[in-house]
Structure formats: C-alpha cells, structure tokens
Image (spheres, helix red, strand yellow):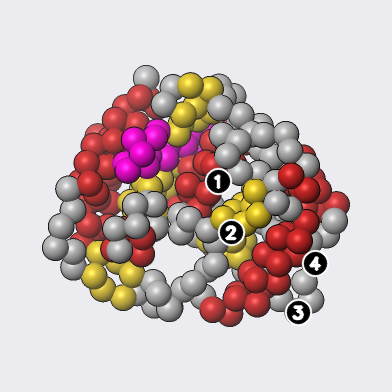
C-alpha cells in the first residue's frame, strides 16, 4: 500500500536522525532559525525515496528553497526535521513530516517521531492511526483542555499575538504545553493527549501532513481567523478537537486588535 511505502521511507529517515553526530549548524533568515547538515541530508533522502514511489509527483521541502507545484497532480510536502532547534540541542522532540496532496488537496499524512518510535498516519476517508492503532481526538470542553502552542520564535513580530492568545487560553483551560514541533503538537491533539494547538505563522510543510491526521481523527484545522489553510504560502494555524475548536471561535479568543495573522 502507498501509505506503508511512505511510512517505511519516513522510518528509515528517522534512523538518520538517531545516528546524527558532529552537526554543522547554519542560521537562516529570522531569529533562532537554523538548518543543519542533517536537515539537508534527511530531505535529500526523503526526496529520493518518495519520488521512487511516485516518480511523477512534485516535491516541496523546507530546505534549499525546494518549491514546486502543489495544485496539479501529486505533490509531496515535506519537513525533514520539524523541530530543528530541539534536534540541535538533543532535546528529543523532533519529527519527520510528509504530506501528500492530489490536485491541491491533502490526501495522506505521515508523521514519525524517531525518539518515541511513534508513527502517525492517515489517508483521507480511512481514519487516523498511531502505530497502526486507530486514534481519535478527545471530547473535553475548553475548561478541561490542554493547549499546545508554538511561539514562532523566528518571527518576533508575532510575539505579542502569541502570548496574548496564550494567556487568554491559559485562563480558560487547564494548562499549556510547548514542544517545539508543531507536527508533534497536532498529533498530540489527534490522539487525545492534548485538545487544541496553535501557532501564529507556519509554513505548509509544518502542517500539511498533520492536517490529514488531525481531521481523520475527528478534529478540525484552519487559520486563526477561521479561513481555510493554504498549501502555497504560510499562514496562522489552530487545530483541535471539535469541541475545543468550536469553543475557541465561539469565545472569539482570536480577536486581538491590530495584529495580522499572516
């Protein structure tokens, strides 16, 4: 099956991450925005492995300005190491994220956490799974929810928005969590470990795969102003269980004056 072949490539790439040593680290534009030689190595491995499965597919990756058409035919949208700063510091909260779109619609998602050996997968219409076991979002109201947040550390223009929203949600919920990998945050929501996750600015490779996993697990995802996610440009993201997501918008937490979302 296609999902199994893609998952196998992701797990092999995970072994590269686990074997990493003597990293070469370079800065990218923005604050606290890094790339290592292993980001590039893993992306190259994924590109070769995934295009061997679907040779005619387009390929979009985070590193080396790897852009392509995501609206015609198949397209892989890939983050080779989601949580690069964690990876550099051996914080062990990073993931490999692979989304597959067809004519601009995400139809498959694979996220692999090599440190926990956790493989999250989903195909449109066929449910979501963690290590082949079906998963589903929790059914907690916001008052009994755990909220995951990303701080968009590479774009400090979003800091006030992020922490204003985080404070509002902290006051309404049980507690906050910050992992440093949005893919892992959204997967935590998908399997019921958390209830809502948001970040003020993300790129399509950060959320393409988890958009399928989250929605197949019964959750919802959009931009912070409730508009649909985009696969061709960055945007803000909020995702959650149906209950927490609805309460987020019913209570208009997202309405913060004079702060653009993307």
Q: Are marks 2 and 4 in contact (CB under 8 Å)?
A: no
Provide the major secondary structure of the magenta segment.
strand
Residue in view at x 52 percent, y 41 percent: 187
Residue 101 belongs to magenta span: no
Q: In this view of the protein, which residue sits in the foreground, 113 or 78? A: 113
Between the residue at mark 4 and the residue at mark 1, the CA separation in whole angstroms equals: 22 Å
Q: Earlier in the sequence, mark 4 or mark 1?
A: 1
Mark 4, other Cα within 10 Å: few <14 / some 14–19 / many ≥20: few
Q: Are marks 3 and 2 in contact (CB under 8 Å)?
A: no
Q: Earlier in the sequence, mark 3 or mark 2?
A: 2
Mark 3, other Cα within 10 Å: few <14 / some 14–19 / many ≥20: few
Between the residue at mark 2 and the residue at mark 4, the CA separation in whole angstroms equals: 17 Å
Between the residue at mark 1 and the residue at mark 3, the CA separation in whole angstroms equals: 27 Å
Residue 217, position as x, y percentages in the image: 60, 31
- Quadrant of the image occupied by residue 258: bottom right
Q: Residue 140 vs residue 199: left or right?
A: right
Give the SS element for disc 2. strand
For disc 4, the marked residue is: 255
Mark 1, other Cα within 10 Å: few <14 / some 14–19 / many ≥20: many
Residue 124, position as x, y percentages in the image: 56, 29
Q: Are marks 4 and 1 in contact (CB under 8 Å)?
A: no
First to last magenta residue range:
102-119
For disc 1, the marked residue is: 186
Disc ID at residue 258: 3
Residue 107 belongs to magenta span: yes
Q: Are marks 1 and 2 in contact (CB under 8 Å)?
A: no
Between the residue at mark 4 and the residue at mark 3, the CA separation in whole angstroms equals: 9 Å
Residue 157, position as x, y percentages in the image: 58, 80
For disc 2, the marked residue is: 149
Give the SS element for disc 3. loop
């Amino acid at each position: 099956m296609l999902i199994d072949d893609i998952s196998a490539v992701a797990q092999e790439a995970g072994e590269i991450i686990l074997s990493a040593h003597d990293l070469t680290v370079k800065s990218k534009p923005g604050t606290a925005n890094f790339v290592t030689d292993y980001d590039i190595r893993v992306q190259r491995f994924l590109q070769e492995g995934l295009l061997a499965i679907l040779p005619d597919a387009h390929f979009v990756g985070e590193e080396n300005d790897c852009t392509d058409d995501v609206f015609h035919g198949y397209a892989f949208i890939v983050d080779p190491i989601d949580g690069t700063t964690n990876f550099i510091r051996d914080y062990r909260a990073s993931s490999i994220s692979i989304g597959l779109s067809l004519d601009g619609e995400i139809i498959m998602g694979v996220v692999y956490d090599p440190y926990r050996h956790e493989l999250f997968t989903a195909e449109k219409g066929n449910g979501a799974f963690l290590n082949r076991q079906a998963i589903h979002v929790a059914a907690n109201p916001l008052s009994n929810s755990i909220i995951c947040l990303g701080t968009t550390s590479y774009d400090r223009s979003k800091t006030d928005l992020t922490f204003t929203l985080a404070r509002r949600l902290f006051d309404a919920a049980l507690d906050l969590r910050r992992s440093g990998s949005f893919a892992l945050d959204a997967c935590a929501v998908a399997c019921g470990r958390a209830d809502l996750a948001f970040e003020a600015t993300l790129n399509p490779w950060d959320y393409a795969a988890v958009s399928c996993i989250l929605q197949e697990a019964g959750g919802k995802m959009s931009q912070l102003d409730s508009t649909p996610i985009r696969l061709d440009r960055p945007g803000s993201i909020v995702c959650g269980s149906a209950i927490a997501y609805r309460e987020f918008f019913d209570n208009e937490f997202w309405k913060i004056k004079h702060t653009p979302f993307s």
